[in-house]
Image (spheres, rainbow, N blue to C red):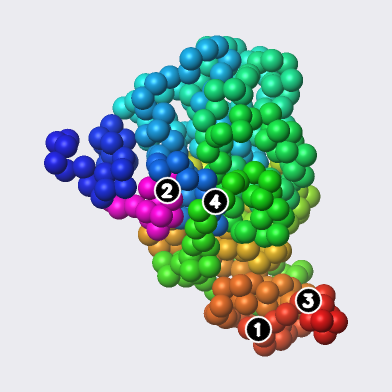
């Protein structure tokens, strides 16, 4: 590819080896988060960004990191130059895959380390030093404590999905890591939401940051058709079977709240002749890895996943997501539906809503700024009707707070 035809990514400050890799992957133009974040990161700015899954978030920090690290290499053994913290094993692996894809014309090295697997190969891989280390906080601290990795050469820290790391109780581990890093490094924080907890973390970690927020205007992407079905709780699994068979769905990612619920639903579907797999944190890392690969390859049509388990599921061309259970808080809904309709492809997000989900539904619709289209399926009309939505719904505890003021 001639240097005169580098495409729109070169205008962001990315060099030819990187733009070549992007073009080979079929990326036509930068997404909003990429256009806003990449130039700031290349300038050396500290950054906090609110960005949902499906907006091209990973590339928005991986591409400029590759650009910045392209000149040079780790100077000593057991050292790293960029550290990316991620909440789950699946997300760490996914980021590592992207680093390798985008950096394939560069000689940089990367490694993902996480718990739930033998640490010996990870320690071995760290010995020569790596340029980009992607890590879950617990395993990173374990290996740091065993002197398998040192932090003094780190130039850039990324905290990805910061809200999820805090929800999973990693705040102490994150603070321990922050305390041990060099003071003059570049800090980048990405989060689906900029909650108070995330902002508190940002205050301690990120000095005078440049802030980007695209979550609100991306919350309801036009290319995702969203609708809900009102149905009684005890009819949900029969409804799901009916929809799968009636519509001959090619593939669906089905969200459910609990591990037990995922296993039970898989069993109920199997009794109706539908093969589905349960994907959650209770299953071994090896099984989860195989399930993910098979789902991506289309060998598994229907995956039932808990919210935490599914954070690392990133599948191009996923046709639909089903909210079998309506998530809480509302931002989790936005995050979930972002699994489909990626890179401007069309997608479908269907939610099952029973009467006891009403308040939750109102909060989600208030977050989106619009009502979700309601449908009833013949034979599954609810005995307990779901009330009309209240778009400006305020949860009771917030109403009480307002009245006190």
Where is mark 3, residue-wise? 398
Mark 3 vs 2: CB contact within 8 A: no
- Residue occupied by mark 4: 209
Q: CA distance from mark 1 to mark 3?
A: 12 Å
**Label 3 neighbour load within 10 Å: few <14, some 14-19, many 20+:** few
Q: Residue at x 71, y 86 (%)?
A: 387
Label 1: state its secondary structure.
Answer: loop
Q: Secondary structure at mark 3?
A: helix
Please tell me which residue lies in front, 136 or 265: 136
The residue at which mark 1 appears reads as 392
Q: Using residue 383 as the reference point, say whether residue 251 is left or right of it.
A: left
- Earlier-in-chain disc, 4 versus 2: 2
Residue 177's x, y, as percent?
69, 32
Report the residue at 68% width, 29% height from top: 180
**N-term-proximal mark, 2 vs 1:** 2
The N terminus, quarter of image:
top left
The residue depicted at 78 percent of the width and 76 percent of the height is 398
Determine contact: label 4, label 2, CB under 8 Å. no
Q: Earlier in the sequence, mark 4 or mark 1?
A: 4
Disc 1 crowd rating (10 Å Cα; few below 14, some 14-19, many 20+) is few
The residue tagged 2 is 40
Nearest to the observer: residue 298 or residue 170: 170
In magenta, the rendered stretch is 28-41
Q: Give the x, y percent position of residue 37.
A: 43, 50
Quarter of the image for residue 138 reads top right
Select label 2 or label 1 by which is in front.
2
Of badges 1 and 3, the one in the foreground is 3
Task: Judge from the rendering whether residue 68 lies leftward or rightward of residue 190; answer left or right.
Answer: left
- Few, some or many C-alpha atoms within 10 Å of disc 4 (few <14, some 14-19, many ≥20)? some
Q: Is residue 35 magenta?
A: yes
The relative height of residue 38 versus residue 245 in the rendered view (above or below) is above
- Which badge, 1 or 3, is on the more N-terminal residue? 1
């Amino acid at each position: 590819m001639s240097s005169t035809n580098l495409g729109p990514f070169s205008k962001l400050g990315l060099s030819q080896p990187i733009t070549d890799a992007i073009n080979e992957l079929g990326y036509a133009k930068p997404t909003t988060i990429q256009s806003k974040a990449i130039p700031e990161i290349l300038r050396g700015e500290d950054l906090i960004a609110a960005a949902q899954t499906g907006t091209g978030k990973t590339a928005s920090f991986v591409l400029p990191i590759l650009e910045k690290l392209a000149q040079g290499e780790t100077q000593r053994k057991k050292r790293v130059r960029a550290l990316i913290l991620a909440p789950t094993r699946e997300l760490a692996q996914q980021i590592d895959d992207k680093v390798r894809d985008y950096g394939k014309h560069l000689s940089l090295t990367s490694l993902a380390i996480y718990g739930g697997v033998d640490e010996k190969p990870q320690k071995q891989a760290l010995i020569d030093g790596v340029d980009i280390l992607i890590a879950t906080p617990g395993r990173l601290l374990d290996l740091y404590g065993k002197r398998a990795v040192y932090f003094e050469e780190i130039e850039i820290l990324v905290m990805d999905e910061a809200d999820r790391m805090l929800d999973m109780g990693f705040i102490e581990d994150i603070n321990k890591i922050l305390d041990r890093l060099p003071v003059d490094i570049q800090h980048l924080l990405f989060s689906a939401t900029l909650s108070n907890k995330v902002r508190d973390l940002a205050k301690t970690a990120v000095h005078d940051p440049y802030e980007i927020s695209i979550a609100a205007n991306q919350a309801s992407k036009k290319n995702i058709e969203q609708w809900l079905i009102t149905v009684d709780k005890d009819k949900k699994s029969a409804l799901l079977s009916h929809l799968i068979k009636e519509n001959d769905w090619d593939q669906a990612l089905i969200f459910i709240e609990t591990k037990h619920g995922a296993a039970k639903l898989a069993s109920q579907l199997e009794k109706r002749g539908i093969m589905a797999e349960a994907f959650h944190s209770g299953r071994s890392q090896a099984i989860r890895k195989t399930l993910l690969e098979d789902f991506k390859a289309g060998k598994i049509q229907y995956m039932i996943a808990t919210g935490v388990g599914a954070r690392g599921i990133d599948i191009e061309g996923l046709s639909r997501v089903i909210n079998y259970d309506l998530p809480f808080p509302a931002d989790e809904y936005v995050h979930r539906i972002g699994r489909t309709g990626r890179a401007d492809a069309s997608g479908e997000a269907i939610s099952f809503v029973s009467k006891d989900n009403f308040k939750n539904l109102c909060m989600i619709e208030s977050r989106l700024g619009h009502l979700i289209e309601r449908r009833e399926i013949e034979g599954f009309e609810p005995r307990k009707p779901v009330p009309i939505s209240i778009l400006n719904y305020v949860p009771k505890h917030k109403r009480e707070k307002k009245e006190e003021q």
